[in-house]
Amino acid sequence: MLIQEKISTFQAQIEQFQQYLDFPNAQHETSAKLAEIVSTRGISQDELREEIAQLQQKLHRLVKLLEKIRDRASVGELTVLYFVKSNFLLKEILDDGYWVLYWGEDAKKAIEELTSGSVALYKDLKSLVSPETPKKDINYVVVETLKHSLNSLLEAGLRVNAFSQEEVNAFDLGDITPQESETVLIFLSTMKKWEPVYKRLAAS
C-alpha cells in the first residue's frame, strides 16, 4: 500500500517551492533550482507557479484517497477501488512532467521507498495470480494496477537518480506491461458489491 508519509515529503518540498517563488532568495539552493527549471523549460515563473499549484491539488487528492484506504482498512472493509484510484493518481503525478520538481535526497529517498514497497507487494501478490484467475479477483486487480504505477515509479526513479538501471534490473519484475486499462480496473474493483444484485437477477 502507498505510504502517506512519503507523499508528505513531496508536499513539503512543493510548499517550499511555492514560498521561494513568492519570496526568492538568490543565495538559496531552492531559488537556484527554480530558476534552472524556468530557464531549461523555457517557461515563465507564473507558468511554473501554476504547475506547482496543480501539483499541490493532486497531492492533496492523493492524501485524501490514502486516508480513505486507512480509515476503511481500520474497520476491516475492502478498499480496492481507492487503491486503484490512488495508484493511478500517483501515476498521473509522476507522468505529467512533475518529476522535475522532485529533487534532493529526501525526494529521492521517498521515491526509492515507494518503489520498493510497491515492488514487494507486487511480488507477493503476483504469485497468487495465474491465467485461470478471474479478472474480478482482488489479487488480479491489485497486480494489474501495480503494473501501471510501477512503470511510472521506475521511470521517475531513474530520472532523479533514486536508483540505477542495474538496480531496476535487480528487482527482477519480468514483464510488467499492463493488460488492463484504468477504466477496466476501476470497473473490476467495484464488481464485488454488485454480485448480490447479479445473483438475485439470475434467480428471478
Image: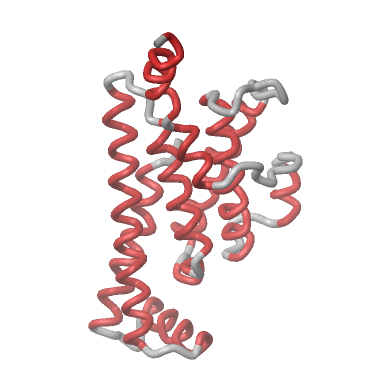
Question: Where 155 falls versus 16 (above or below)?
Answer: above
Residue 178 is left or right of residue 40, and the answer is right
Percent position of residue 106, x then y: 44, 57
Residue 201 picture location, percent across and down: 41, 17
Quarter assignment of residue 85: top left
**Quarter of the rendering containing residue 128:** top right
Q: How is the image coloured?
A: secondary structure
Give the total number of marks visible in the rendering: 0
**x%, y% of residue 97?**
51, 70
Residue lying furthest front: 204
Residue sitting at 38 percent across and 58 percent down?
Answer: 10
Q: Nearer the viewer, residue 194 or 86?
A: 194
Q: Which of 193 and 12 is in front in this view?
A: 193
Side of 107 relative to 62 (left or right): right
Whether residue 103 is visible to the viewer of this picture, yes or no, is no
Q: Is residue 141 above or below residue 202?
A: below
In the image, what residue occupies the spot 45% across and 14% down? 202
Instruction: Tell me where residue 4 appears, x and y as whole percent.
Output: 36, 43
